[in-house]
Image: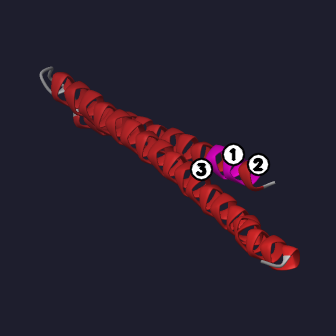
Amino acid sequence: MNIHLKKTLFAIPMIGLLGIAPLAFAHDEQQEHQAEHQDFNAEHREQHQGLNAEHRTQHQVLSDTHEAMHQYPMTEKQHRRLHRKLNKAHKGEHQELNAQHSAGHQALDDQHQDYHD
């Protein structure tokens, strides 16, 4: 067999391997990218679950406080003041949770951007 033919027959599979290697690398990179996104999504879900649990706890505390205060006699003026204070505390807790929620999203967005940079 001609020596050039042998070299050509040997070179064709090697060139094929060189072409496949970048494809395999790109595939691995895509899988890694998807895994990173899945990690970000899992962290995002955990943050929401934590905030929701904190929200439920805060509502329960306010409800318990409200119920406990109604065990004592009070004037109409004291009753309105109690409800204003409870409503103010409720609003403040929601604002705090919203701030934590926004900060959590910003932190995840920053991590995501850092990953892509």
Give the residue at x 15% y 20%.
72
Q: Residues within 10 Å of mark 2 (few under 14, many from 20)?
A: few
Tell me which amino acid carries mark 1.
Answer: Gln
Q: Are marks 3 and 2 in contact (CB under 8 Å)?
A: no
Give the residue at x 81% y 79%.
5
Q: Are marks 1 and 2 in contact (CB under 8 Å)?
A: yes
Q: Nearer the viewer, residue 73 or 116?
A: 116
- Mark nearest the camera among 1 and 3 is 1
Q: Which residue is mark 3?
A: 105
Give the residue at x 30% y 31%.
57
How far separated are the C-alphas under marks 1 and 2?
5 Å
SS at mark 1 in the image: helix
**Label 3 or label 2, whichever comes before in sequence order:** 3
SS at mark 3 in the image: helix
- Mark nearest the camera among 3 and 2 is 2
Left or right relative to 17: residue 108: left
Left or right relative to 46: residue 79: left
Q: Which residue is mark 1?
A: 111
Q: Which residue is mark 2?
A: 114
Residue 56 visible (yes or no): yes
Q: Residue furthest front?
A: 1
Q: Quadrant of the C terminus?
A: bottom right
Q: Is residue 17 magenta?
A: no
Q: Nearer the viewer, residue 38 or 72?
A: 38
Image: magenta residue range: 107-114
Q: Position of residue 17 (x, y in %)?
A: 70, 65
Q: Position of residue 102 (x, y in %)?
A: 59, 49
Residue 77 visible (yes or no): no
